Amino acid sequence: MITASVAMTNHLTTMCNAAGIPLVLFNRRQDDARLSSVTSDNMAGGQRAARHLIEAGHQRIAHIMGWQGSSTGRDRAAGFSLAMADAGMRHAEVVEGMSSRETARAVTLLLFAGPDHPDAVFVGNDHMAFAVMDTLRHELGLRVPQDVSLVRYDDVPLAAWPSYDLTTIRQPVNRMVEATVATLLNQIEGDTAPRQITIDGPLILRGSVRKP
């Protein structure tokens, strides 16, 4: 089995593992050292996003997190907070967007309700980032990146379209798939040693962050 569910429970995966069913978690991990998983390096990605915004000169950087019930959302948020602390900076706000377009829109309206709103936002995934950018431009009349810079995570094809042109941390999907298949085949062939594999993804520079 290859599982890719955000909310896959430890109970179910533990049962599969106990039954001897070859199992790899794709793009998710659980807090169980007996389970094999393959993810992007979400912690490093969150750090890279924050450092890029800091290097661009931003002072009020917010983070709209993905669902904190998922390892990806937690790890990206942890990396962001670590980079901010290393730079001696306080984040403007860290709020949960629940990986939902509707919630991301509502959170954006709340973050930008006052005069001292963020001058940059790291959005935890693509699904929310498009809603955030649309809300900033079309409902609040703000320009990206002149008024607000945006960095997000994943890099689905829509992010490169000229209407969005979003700077992003790219998921190294092809390498993640290769590692997942190799890990699963090793298990099928009798190598049951658990492996937690993280693969670093690059920062893709586009037009949604002002130049340093």
Image (tube, helix red, strand yellow):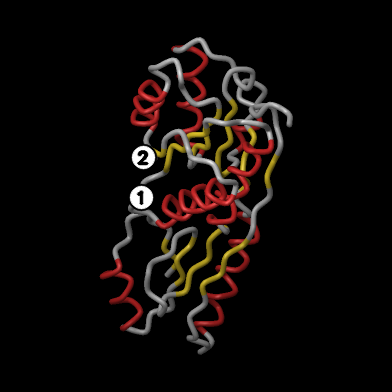
- The Cα atoms of the two marked residues, 1 and 2, are separated by 7 Å
The extreme front residue here reads 88
In the image, residue 192 above or below residue 112? below
The extreme right residue here reads 212
The extreme left residue here reads 11
21 or 127: nearer the viewer: 127
Residue corresponding to mark 2: 96
Question: Mark 1 falls on what kind of element?
Answer: loop
- Identity of the residue drawn at 58% across and 15% down: 143
Residue 135 picture location, percent across and down: 45, 19
Residue 106 picture location, percent across and down: 34, 25
- Mark sitting on residue 68: 1
Q: Amino acid at mark 2?
A: Glu
Q: Are marks 1 and 2 in contact (CB under 8 Å)?
A: yes
Which quadrant of the figure has residue 177?
bottom right
Q: Residues within 10 Å of mark 1 (few under 14, many from 20)?
A: some
Q: Earlier in the sequence, mark 1 or mark 2?
A: 1
In the image, residue 31 above or below residue 165? below
